[in-house]
Image: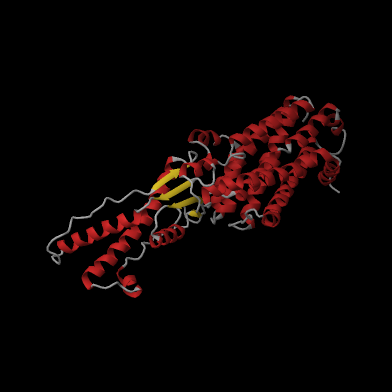
Amino acid sequence: MSPLVASIIKEFKVLSRDKTGLLLMFLMPLVLALLMTVLQNSAFKIVNENKVDLMLINNDSNSLFFQNFCKGIEQTGMFDLKINTKEISSKKLSEDKESIVVVTIPKGYAYTLDQEVKAKAEQSLQMFGMLESVSTKGIIGVKNIELSFDPVLQESYRFSIKSTVLSVVMAIQNEMLLKQLFYDVNQSEPDSAALSKILPKPLLLSESLIKENSVANPNATQHNIPAWTVFAMFFTVISLGGNIVREKRSGSFLRIKTLPISITQMLIAKQVVFWIVTVLQTLVLFSIGILIFPMLQLPPLVISSGLLPLFLATLCCGLCAVSFALCIGVYSDTVEQANGFGAASVVILAAVGGIFVPLFAMPEVFKLIANVSPFSWAMKAYYSAILEISPIHKLLLNVLPLLLLTAILQLIAFIGLKRKNLL
């Protein structure tokens, strides 16, 4: 058996005795991924897919307009419609938090709208030369539908809701106008077949993403599984960094010089073992996202690009995390220094790099700052593997900064070992 293989086996045995380190490396990220996905799932849904709770108060007696209005609101697919039958004001409903949007149809609204439509129909016929005069008697101004919003709604969201409600009313008004014109010309009500012919069909828009072969912002699962996987990889600094410090202080590095194995081989063996650990961490966390999350009513993890890009991203991220831990262990004089500085730096880099809050939800200033964090580079690599259907060379461009940082960290660790006469 070669000295390197024997050293790898020895490191596996040493790691298997570190129960606390194994819990930190496997159980902690698993719990964090589950908790953060559950907590963030609703917030991600608000951005991506949730419907708005809309309460409708009908103070008008015209049931036909009310039915058409409800049908139009439901067809938009934007609202979760609730109809209030109690005698209560929209302000009171908003205060009781029953809905974040309340729409009130005032008394006599359908009648005033009908009068407005008849007047418009007569004016149209006069312009076409089919009517000599237009009656101006009895024209009543159309009342306004009242919209009440919860203060938590942003202005842009309010504008979107107002535009949607207005489009529903306009569609009803246009249908009423066409019916009235048909009646004035033919002196009869149009049947459904005739009405469907003269009513314009809804305009359709072709929707696509700006970036080819990609999907929209990640959901809670697509963000948290790779995020806490990367966090777990870099948190190996607690075990690997502390392990190196203990062996330095105990004199193991000096004793190794008398054995038929070099310190370089021993350090390579340590890195290989923890590199394998990072792959196992990825396997465990991604399996949870694929198999367990759907059972918990959470979005399942779907890998768009296949396993090869995911495997390459994992190897590069794991190698960078192991090199970071090696560097911390070489330059720390005590276990407390390695654990304290290592844990603090990992948390800070994770916060800056978009682990706790995804990059797309960050302010522009923080997006710029995130570019200096290896966590951000790792997340981009995983997003490329999970969310995009792209060739391997695009993934390699995302992992290139990680590989460069790995080389720099290995060089820094080598210089530290030389200065301390450990090589």
* Residue at x-position 65% and y-position 43%: 36
Count of labels in the image: 0
**Rendering coords of residue 327 (x, y %):** 70, 32
The figure's colour scheme reads secondary structure
* Residue at x-position 66% and y-position 31%: 345
Apparent side of residue 253 relative to residue 373 in the rendered image (left or right): right
Position of residue 273 relative to residue 137, above or below, is above
* Residue at x-position 53% and y-position 33%: 369
Q: Nearer the viewer, residue 381 or 166?
A: 166
Q: Nearer the viewer, residue 149 or 202?
A: 149
Apparent side of residue 129 relative to residue 10 in the rendered image (left or right): left
Snapshot quadrant of residue 278 = top right
Q: Quadrant of the C terminus?
A: top right
> Is residue 421 at all visible to an observer of this figure?
no
Snapshot quadrant of residue 415 = top right
* Residue at x-position 72% and y-position 48%: 279
Position of residue 249 relative to residue 407, above or below, is above
**Rendering coords of residue 391 (x, y %):** 54, 56
**Rendering coords of residue 15 (x, y %):** 83, 41
**Rendering coords of residue 221 (x, y %):** 62, 50
> Is residue 350 at all visible to an observer of this figure?
yes
